[in-house]
Amino acid sequence: MRRGDGSVWGHLPELRTRGRRPAGASECAARLARVTSEVASAEASVPTRRTYSYLGPAGTFTEAALAQVPEARGHEWRSVRNVGEALADVVEGRSDAAMIAIENSVDGGVSTAQDALATVPGLRIVGEYLVPVEFVLVGRPGARLEDVSLIAAHPVAYAQCLQWLSGSLPAHAHVPAASNVASAMSLLDGSSDADAAIAPPGILEHHELELLASNIGDNPNAVTRFVLVSRTVVPPPPTGADKTSLIVELPDDHPGALLEMLEQFATRGINLSLLASRPIGDELGRYRFVVDADGHLEDERMADALLGLRRFSPRVTFLGSYPRADRAVVRYPERYADDVFVEARDWLRGLISGEPEVQE
Amino acid sequence: MRRGDGSVWGHLPELRTRGRRPAGASECAARLARVTSEVASAEASVPTRRTYSYLGPAGTFTEAALAQVPEARGHEWRSVRNVGEALADVVEGRSDAAMIAIENSVDGGVSTAQDALATVPGLRIVGEYLVPVEFVLVGRPGARLEDVSLIAAHPVAYAQCLQWLSGSLPAHAHVPAASNVASAMSLLDGSSDADAAIAPPGILEHHELELLASNIGDNPNAVTRFVLVSRTVVPPPPTGADKTSLIVELPDDHPGALLEMLEQFATRGINLSLLASRPIGDELGRYRFVVDADGHLEDERMADALLGLRRFSPRVTFLGSYPRADRAVVRYPERYADDVFVEARDWLRGLISGEPEVQE
Amino acid sequence: MRRGDGSVWGHLPELRTRGRRPAGASECAARLARVTSEVASAEASVPTRRTYSYLGPAGTFTEAALAQVPEARGHEWRSVRNVGEALADVVEGRSDAAMIAIENSVDGGVSTAQDALATVPGLRIVGEYLVPVEFVLVGRPGARLEDVSLIAAHPVAYAQCLQWLSGSLPAHAHVPAASNVASAMSLLDGSSDADAAIAPPGILEHHELELLASNIGDNPNAVTRFVLVSRTVVPPPPTGADKTSLIVELPDDHPGALLEMLEQFATRGINLSLLASRPIGDELGRYRFVVDADGHLEDERMADALLGLRRFSPRVTFLGSYPRADRAVVRYPERYADDVFVEARDWLRGLISGEPEVQE
Amino acid sequence: MRRGDGSVWGHLPELRTRGRRPAGASECAARLARVTSEVASAEASVPTRRTYSYLGPAGTFTEAALAQVPEARGHEWRSVRNVGEALADVVEGRSDAAMIAIENSVDGGVSTAQDALATVPGLRIVGEYLVPVEFVLVGRPGARLEDVSLIAAHPVAYAQCLQWLSGSLPAHAHVPAASNVASAMSLLDGSSDADAAIAPPGILEHHELELLASNIGDNPNAVTRFVLVSRTVVPPPPTGADKTSLIVELPDDHPGALLEMLEQFATRGINLSLLASRPIGDELGRYRFVVDADGHLEDERMADALLGLRRFSPRVTFLGSYPRADRAVVRYPERYADDVFVEARDWLRGLISGEPEVQE
């Protein structure tokens, strides 16, 4: 039985068609490639004005994340007050995409974001962005560090600068603010008696403030992870440095269920970079899992893992495959390479058709 | 070779000694029981004034959690501004215990709390408390709901009441506040033009405010989970409805490591109620895991799992075994009962000593 | 993207095509069905005389197994002296098929058979047959049980009748014979002084012997399992009560390799009915495994397991999928049904094409 | 809480006590050592004549295995006809030990041996012996190779020499014999017309035969594995190159049960050198497993695996821990060393007693 024969082809699965694609399938793939490139070019070149929602106001870490998106430049940025509002903008068509904090955020709301992605249908993550958690101390124009005694700051940001503050301004007092940006703005709008405020560096691009000190955060490595979320689209093509985000609901609550879920990844050589349980909330002891896995939906091993996951639990939500923010190439054992999957399918096809096995 | 012989006993002994305890070991257990009860009675009856740190000010959900601790009544409650401060109070001896939010907190800081427990040595969780996330709408004395147009609220709390607000006060506007309690206090101290504020119900016990509406949160099942943290102590005795909290660092980053860690629980019939990866922060791709497992350190299956875990990774931090807040009795397959562990040890002891096996 | 479109089909197609088969693939399947049925009808009806090798001489348990094969009736049966000879007959074209004992044989040679199947290429098991291990005591024509004192028997057969002999003929003596059949024939050809012999019941159809006692074996449930082996052919179609035989060489010798191999079956709900390690013989500590798994190559879960197995180890030998001798329908959890595999592929296809997920 | 305190000791398990043994336990261990050495010296030096059963007659491979046992020299060797008889001799006290073939035997009966060990209680394997499967061609005194045309041989032995025979004596004919030794003896006792016989080399020490050719077996690496079986005794002390033999009955028939059994070994870094399923025989689809695992009952990881196994299935039969025939030192990952187990117990003990953890 010849390979590449269209009718045989239909008989056995082939996930990806690059390289060794037979006639019939190649048309499909070509069409798919065309669609993908149209979507991409639509994003990049069409004159239509697009709208991006983000947790504002201007100057937040979320805005700094959005500033990393080349396609967003010159389009409308819509400041919203929370993650729910941002995602609702996308679902209801007010925005084309929303930037939301998904891990380690000082702006808060990470579990809210995870729960929202798990329950709001029709969303897809299309990009990941990292923003260093850096803080500056700012004052009114002309202010000097040695005159600072009362500091406005959001409590979480304040906690993250405590070490620097204790060293540099041991006699200071703290007045809590509603947000990182609000702490700075309160200096200018007269609503605060504070002498200085802790804020993200981005604030300096938006307001006339005096920079009193930079990098005052206690952890120089802290970063917040953001994702850009759109309505469901064809995933961007694999880059070799991709991430796949999923929400998986365990089928029932027994000790083995979680293990079985994770084995779907481990037995295909796939590393996870995020795993978190979230109570589903409908009854005690039921959990869903937020998962980030290394690789792309169109990698053979990831596609196979997704098939296994879907068979394991009908409640798997695919949130997207997209390039990693750090562009780190995904490493995996050679035995999970695409070729190995293709070779195994050829072998199985031979068995079914009764071809004599060639002993290598 | 007889069983129950003291010297043999030392050769292959027991974790727990209840029921079938030989002479020597029972003394130990009795002594241990005495110590435990002294600690407990110390907590309950000693006239010394104790101090409890919590995220304040008065009226927060954290204060509501602390109000659930009988031993804390009549002692000093110390209001602090963040989790780091609360735990530092305990470590440095300013407080006997600290109440901190560990899951689903609207007060923020959950990852901060998890990271702090992972890195600050000498701490132990001794109790768990659940506080329903309920919100009230309050105004100045004499205010009426129909007159409300500007509402002060922390952005996260605001998001969680959006559905109610859209229905009941569709024309309202929002002014962000620094904290749930601050939103209410701003009405009274003249620092806000708002007509009403969203706050936890506890605020009404501390301030003269008008209750305009109750239960305005959109999710009636939302709860925040808190833990009470002390310095390292003997764990409270098992109640049958216990939880064990751990921080586990994977020994190295390969797909199997996480599975192997979780197998330590699954192969002993232990369910997890919390699992979350946290980047360690020293280099890319290294994670620690925050784990809550059903059961108590003194349950045979849990002790055995801890042994396995420790052999698997030298970096396991035991945060404590303590009664679950919901008092739900832990269920597990009969094959993981204490008796089964004891029987297996008897059998192994017989093999080592060359006793003929009795075929049942 | 429409389903059932030929070109899309090639992009992520099916293993099996029954029921939901699109145009192109159905032709292939029809052709395949035609080929299969030709092979089958060739086996059954073509006037060509076929040859079957078996461990002889006439009267062995192996001959009794061959007598269970309807297609073998009226064709040539070729008696050989051992498994190696029987398989060589098939490989070298002297025979169309060979019947060999594969488990629990009193004729010996089971490990030899397993090793031969592992190393001789180009063979395929096409059927399984069970023969009860029954023994009769026979004598020369006219002999009587009460006169028996010296008994000829193969040592293994003798051991399996020892209980009956001790009870019924306590004073007997034993003279060992080369084979079960030889023990009986020695009575007739004058080469033995024995009064009686232990033999399979089949001996009575070939030789004029006196039946002195039946069912004298100590274990009434003992059966020997045989397989019919041909050159590589298209496997017989699935019956729902099938077995798949494999030889798997572990890729390297570490504790996890065996587990990983078995997980390929367990994670697809496939039970094993035979598992045996065999030293490969080239160097210390290297093993291959003889595996019988419940199900057929064309069952989705088995095909998926074979793919996983092949990716795991390049040295997997597929020995065949064939109806079980006991016709016991294979049971498996509903979550491993063919439909579940097909549904998961549809879902994955939707993800790749960017279709919005339908939340059920 | 001090370590090494006798009463505390009883509170937590310690399998082995070497090196870091507290007072009470050390007495026990000393006594145990004494007992063990008494047993050993009893074996070695006591003037009592001991009896060893083996599959005879003199000249078999089994006799060659027994010849490797130093303690058996000068004692009575009892030739029996099959494995069942040999084990019955031990159980009923007619023999002190029996040598039986357990793997790869040309004398047959390996599954019988495995089933017998699984069902006959009160037995223990105390040693392992390997005998190369070598064959010689022998004739009557004065015979010459070039005159040989008819060869007497057991069918299995004949098959294993077929390649040599085809090359060196292409025109020969075969007459089957009852056993390897019988084939040779038939030349001498006039019961055979054969010119030569295939036999084990040991035959030359017992009978006046002409050696016509040596090493005529086709596989120069073939070995048969034998075990020496006694009644239940204290296992011989660990040597670092040990093997542990077990029979494990799975608790019920589901895909995961076998995996769970094997995980008991894999999760403690223990390799298996033999794994074989055997139908239990009472009903369809129930299996027991014959397992050889690398290591000794007194190795911490093996003892822990046995505990896990026993909890998993109440039907585990420990057949013995004994030195490997090949004296190959067992290798295992450092993380499964005895020290790691001891350290983990110390750590657990500290947790229970409330000791502050020392962060290394």
Image: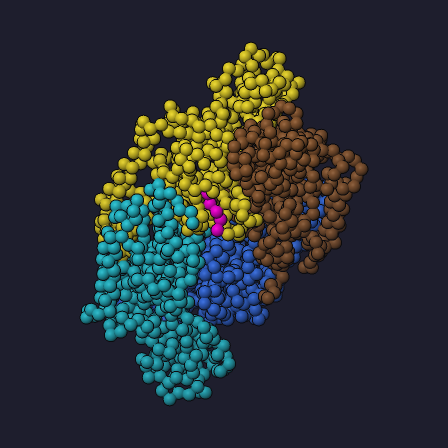
Chain colours: A cyan, B blue, C yellow, D brown
A76 or C93: which is nearer to us? C93
Residue D216, by quadrant, is top right
A221 or C99: which is nearer to us? C99
**Vertical comparison of D340 with A228: above or below:** above
Seen as rendered, the residue at the extreme top is C142
Tell whether D224 sits left or right of B219: right
Q: Position of residue C108 (x, y in %)?
A: 54, 32
Residue D225, by quadrant, is top right
Seen as rendered, the residue at the extreme right is D47
Q: Say if the magenta span includes residue C249.
A: yes
Residue drawn where x is 33% and y is 60% of the image: A321
D261 or A192: which is nearer to us? D261
Tell whether D81 sits left or right of A23: right
Tell whether B320 sits left or right of C241: right
Q: Position of residue A22 (x, y in %)?
A: 27, 52
Seen as rendered, the residue at the extreme left is A47
Residue drawn where x is 63% and y is 27% of the image: D186
**Vertical comparison of C291 with D339: above or below:** above
Seen as rendered, the residue at the extreme bottom is A142
Residue drawn where x is 53% and y is 67% of the image: B119
Residue drawn where x is 35% and y is 52% of the image: A342
Q: Position of residue D95 (x, y in %)?
A: 71, 32
The answer to whether residue A146 is visible is yes
Q: Say if the magenta span includes residue A136.
A: no
- Range of the magenta residues? C247-251
The answer to whether residue C359 is visible is no
Q: Position of residue A194 (x, y in %)?
A: 40, 81
The secondary structure that most of the magenta stretch takes on is strand
